[in-house]
Image (cartoon, rainbow, N blue to C red):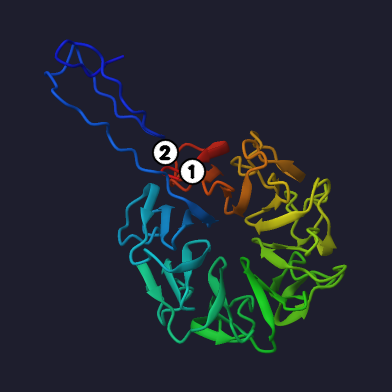
Amino acid sequence: MPVLCNSACRPLSLRPMRFVFLCLALNGCLDPITSMAPAPVAAPGRVELVAAGGRTACALMEGGSVQCWGAPGLVGDGTRSLRVAPKQVSGLTTGVLAISAGSAHTCALSAAGHVACWGENAHGELGSGSTEPTLEPLEVGGLSQVTQVAAGASHTCAVLATGGVQCWGLNEQYQLGAPTPTQALGPMAVPGLEGIRTIAAGATHTCAVTANGEVHCWGGNQHGELGVGAASVEPQPTPRQVLGLPGPMMMAAAGRFHTCAVSPQGAVWCWGQNLFGALGDDTSIDRSLPVQPVGLPSPAIALSAGAGGTCAVLSDGDVYCWGSNLNGQLGDGSRIHRGRPVKVTGLERAGRMVSYGEEFSCATTQALRALCWGKNDEGQLGDGTDTPRELPAPVQGF
């Protein structure tokens, strides 16, 4: 192994670097060194949460800044460069409270109650009044006092402090909660909704949880993702209450064509498409009424649904995932689809938040570190490579 040397050709100790090493091919010694201070090692960034989308992921950092990585033009750093490691999002250096990632766009909620979005915009999902994409965050006009934002495949919704909901973007399946038009380039109110606490946006459907724990869904329902007792090729423009839930729910998570909810006691219920086991009931049968995943060993405290799968953080800190596993996005060391929950390897009793994206997943730990696993062809794992991972790998610098 090459070494740095002092004038007497004795090795000098070097402070180890985390994650990456810079190596020099040397023969013998360098020129004499009279003094040498240890190279500073930057403390790893502390991550509040990670949002996994279609081809990118973003991290909300402690202090309210946002960093993203992944596909060209979607990272929000003002460039069209592929980013295999985190980059600071332009202008979002402080004051961000929450982030949400869709198929090809991301939105951030500020402490002031405003929303800014960036990425692709073919259907107005950025809420900018046009269909032009943007490489940097652009504030959504006509929107204030927002308490939560949710990015779906090609639409976005926000909950207001008044308890109302506004949505924008693609409306082919009435996922905006209105029968016309086919898209909205700016926010429009969802009629008939009040007292909403949280919202979740899927590919072609949207669900909201009221202050008293009712879950209401609207939009596409081909696989029963609205939870109203029957699937239908006809979309539903008006919010309808999910049937069959045993009591109030704390929050909901919308995947591509399925939905899950968790109760205040940590019980998980899922409905919709189940081709690869996204509902976790150990079958591949679509369900138009809620069913429970099989074998979760303790209550869930956080939940995320994505493209064909679901993940949950349990009360003891373990993370369990189920459903599609084509690229190792369940994190159990395999690529076998799982019809019932399996434990993510390498996050034992350390999970804090989890996000299931499109063929990859990410989690934050109780130590405020971030790890990702699954598909990585566009750097969406943020580990400095394009190598897929069947087990969690640290995001570079986190």
* Location of residue 7 (image quadrant): top left
Q: Which residue is mark 1?
A: 376
Q: Are marks 1 and 2 in contact (CB under 8 Å)?
A: yes
**Percent position (x, y) of residue 398?**
45, 45
- Is residue 349 rendered to the left or right of residue 242? left
In the rendering, which numbered label is found on residue 328? none
The residue positioned 47% from the left and 36% from the top of the image is 387
**Percent position (x, y) of residue 315?**
73, 51
In the rendering, which numbered label is found on residue 385? 2
Pointer 1: residues within 10 angstroms few (<14), some, or many (20+)? many
Q: Secondary structure at mark 1?
A: loop
* N-terminal label among 1 and 2: 1
- Residue 374 seen from this side: no
Q: Nearer the viewer, residue 10 or 176?
A: 10
Q: Is residue 112 above or below residue 259?
A: below
**Percent position (x, y) of residue 346?**
62, 36
Q: Nearer the viewer, residue 270 or 144?
A: 144
* Cα distance in 3D space between marks 1 and 2: 8 Å
Q: Is residue 72 above or below residue 181?
A: above
